[in-house]
């Protein structure tokens, strides 16, 4: 019999190095990088770096998001090079790499925030754009500091069951419930272009909404999905953001617990995976300069339900970046 055809171990497109070829190496074999992409030390030029931040010392309820980056990588093994919904091969259009994890202090919030900010600055010296995988939502603040240093005040589209604009928790100014208040206070945000999407559940008082509005956020509540649908949400986002540089921050608990049980502060009545992915595909029209996916806590996951959702969220974000 003739010898088996020799195939490259990686899919390449011009000078861009893509994922491991699943026809040559089974998806369950080999090291788990995001979508089986090359490590940052395996290429020279980088368009988008995927950076893990295994940190969850800012959580207020269930811990475990420190294991999120590894879980999302394992859950991303089935991602494929071509996105038919957007008719794009994101890893052929962009050189995307897995930059590994930042090593941050799990015992000091202040030291961790400083290290994440420094790490994000360093990564943006290598890459045009950054996709960060957490970790809890505290990490959004130091990453936004690095983004604003490069782009100036930035619009934020924040997908979350919660506002994350509270002032403090147990007297602590830096938690996973406070990053966008601190960012607004530091002048990192373009307050004419920020909004929350998917917010729901009980609040401490109506003042939470008043304070949030004063910080410059508009809200597309989860309950509005039944009335305006995906298309209505997309229109609200595009109208609000325009062509501003925008940072997309996605707490996986924006999804209903049926679609993302593996998270620290679940709330009933959330978006479906299909709804969220459809919204993200429209972001090819936005000037997206960076994004994060946070609050994946694998200890509460089953059969990688949440990890797979997070991996596809990352894939759609990267596809939108590729089309832009």
Image (cartoon, grey):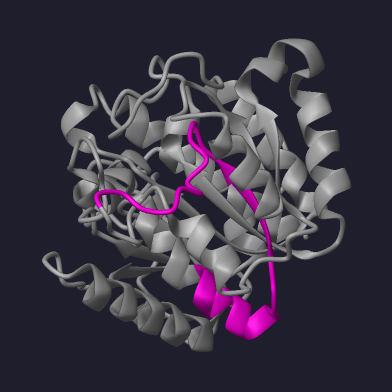
Residue name at image x 82 percent, y 26 percent: 231
Q: Nearer the viewer, residue 92 or 181?
A: 181
Residue 257 position within the rendered picture, expressed as x and y whole percent measured from the top left: 38, 19
Q: Is residue 7 visible?
A: no
In this image, 57 relative to 272: left or right? Answer: left
Residue 262 position within the rendered picture, expressed as x and y whole percent measured from the top left: 28, 29
User: Relative to 311, does residue 265 appear above or below in the rendering?
Assistant: above
Q: Is residue 170 visible?
A: yes
Residue 191 position within the rendered picture, expressed as x and y whole percent measured from the top left: 73, 60
Looking at the rendered image, the quarter that the C terminus falls into is: bottom right
Question: Range of the magenta residues?
Answer: 144-170
> Which quadrant holds residue 147?
bottom right
> Which quadrant holds residue 93?
bottom right
Residue 320 position within the rendered picture, expressed as x and y whole percent measured from the top left: 69, 51
User: Relative to 110, does residue 260 appear above or below in the rendering?
Assistant: above
In this image, 127 relative to 8: left or right? Answer: right
Residue name at image x 29 percent, y 53 percent: 69
> Which quadrant holds residue 101?
bottom left
Q: Nearer the viewer, residue 140 or 17?
A: 140
User: Relative to 200, does residue 290 appear above or below in the rendering?
Assistant: below
In the orientation shown, which residue stands out farthest toward the top?
226
Q: Nearer the viewer, residue 87 or 48?
A: 48
Looking at the rendered image, the quarter that the N terminus falls into is: top left
Residue name at image x 78 percent, y 12 percent: 227
Q: Is residue 203 magenta?
A: no
Q: Nearer the viewer, residue 77 or 6?
A: 77
Q: Is residue 149 magenta?
A: yes
């Amino acid at each position: 019999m003739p010898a088996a055809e020799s195939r490259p171990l990686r899919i390449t497109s011009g000078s861009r190095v893509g994922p491991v070829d699943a026809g040559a190496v089974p998806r369950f074999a080999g090291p788990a990088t995001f979508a089986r992409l090359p490590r940052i030390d395996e290429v020279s030029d980088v368009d988008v770096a995927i950076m893990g931040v295994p940190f969850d010392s800012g959580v207020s309820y269930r811990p475990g998001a420190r294991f999120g980056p590894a879980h999302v990588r394992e859950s991303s093994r089935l991602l494929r090079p071509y996105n038919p919904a957007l008719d794009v091969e994101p890893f052929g259009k962009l050189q995307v790499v897995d930059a590994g994890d930042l090593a941050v202090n799990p015992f000091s919030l202040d030291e961790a925030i400083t290290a994440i900010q420094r790490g994000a600055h360093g990564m943006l010296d290598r890459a045009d754009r950054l996709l960060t995988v957490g970790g809890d939502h505290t990490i959004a603040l130091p990453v936004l500091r690095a983004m604003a240093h490069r782009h100036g005040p930035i619009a934020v589209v924040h997908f979350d069951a919660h506002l994350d604009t509270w002032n403090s928790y147990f007297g602590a100014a830096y938690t996973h419930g406070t990053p966008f208040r601190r960012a607004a206070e530091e002048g990192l945000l373009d307050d004419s272009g920020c909004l929350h999407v998917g917010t729901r559940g009980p609040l401490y008082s109506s003042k939470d909404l008043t304070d949030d509005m004063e910080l410059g956020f508009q809200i597309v509540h989860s309950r509005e999905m039944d009335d305006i649908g995906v298309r209505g949400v997309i229109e609200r986002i595009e109208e609000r953001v325009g062509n501003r540089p925008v940072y997309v921050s996605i707490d996986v608990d924006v999804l209903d617990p049926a679609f993302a049980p593996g998270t620290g502060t679940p709330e009933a009545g959330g978006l479906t995976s299909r709804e969220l992915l459809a919204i993200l595909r429209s972001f090819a029209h936005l000037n997206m300069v960076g994004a994060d996916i946070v609050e994946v806590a694998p200890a509460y996951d089953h059969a990688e339900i949440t990890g797979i959702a997070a991996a596809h969220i990352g894939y759609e974000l990267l596809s939108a970046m590729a089309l832009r």
